[in-house]
Image (cartoon, rainbow, N blue to C red):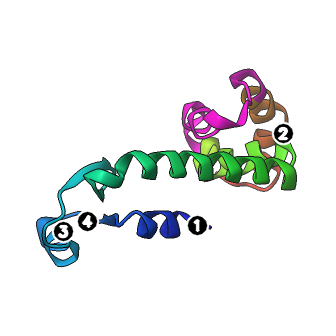
């Protein structure tokens, strides 16, 4: 299962303009904005959100099985180029569902990530 499958299963689609919406809408279906450009039939939006959350939880569980906490934190610190901003807030927010504390992110940032960036000249 993927997010794309979940979106399609519920008759939802991405539309970032009226033109995109008009190209994809089904006549006689009432739609609502599900957030971030996702449009969903009103009758399906509740179940879409439930399925989306279940998928996100399963994805996090799989990630935690396949990667150590340190690897997950290092990946997200890198994704947000924290070596440049020195601000871990985006990383902490990205790891919201992981049960990883801000203190743990900060510890990895100081003790592992920044020394790695310095050693490999990643600035």
* Range of magenta residues: 84-104
- Judge the density around disc 2: few (<14), some (14-19), many (≥20) Cα neighbours within 10 Å: few
Residue bearing mark 1: 2
**For the residue carrying disc 3, how many other residues have a C-alpha within 10 Å: few (<14), some (14-19), or many (20+)?**
some
Q: Which residue matches tag 3? A: 21
Front-most of 6 and 122?
6
The mark closer to the camera, 2 or 3, is: 3
Task: Pick whichever of labels 1 and 4 is earlier in the sequence.
Answer: 1
Residue 88, placed above or below residue 42: above
Q: Main secondary structure of the magenta part?
A: helix
Looking at marks 1 and 3 on the same chain, the residue that comes earlier in the sequence is marked by: 1
**Residue 91 placement: quadrant:** top right
Chain-order first, disc 4 or disc 3: 4
Q: Which residue is mark 4?
A: 15
Q: Earlier in the sequence, mark 1 or mark 2?
A: 1
Give percent across and percent down for residue 96: 61, 34
Quick check: 52 left or right of 107? left
**Magenta run includes residue 61:** no
The answer to which of 79 and 6 lies nearer the viewer is 6
């Amino acid at each position: 299962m993927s997010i794309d499958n979940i979106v399609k299963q519920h008759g939802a689609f991405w539309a970032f303009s009226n033109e995109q919406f008009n190209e994809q809408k089904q006549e006689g279906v009432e739609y609502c904005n599900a957030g971030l450009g996702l449009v969903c039939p009103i009758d399906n939006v509740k179940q879409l959100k439930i399925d989306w959350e279940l998928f996100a939880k399963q994805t996090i569980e799989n990630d935690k099985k396949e990667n150590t906490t340190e690897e997950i934190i290092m990946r997200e610190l890198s994704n947000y180029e924290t070596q440049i901003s020195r601000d871990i807030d985006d990383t902490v927010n990205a790891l919201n569902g992981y049960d990883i504390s801000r203190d743990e992110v900060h510890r990895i940032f100081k003790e592992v990530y920044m020394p790695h960036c310095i050693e490999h000249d990643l600035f």
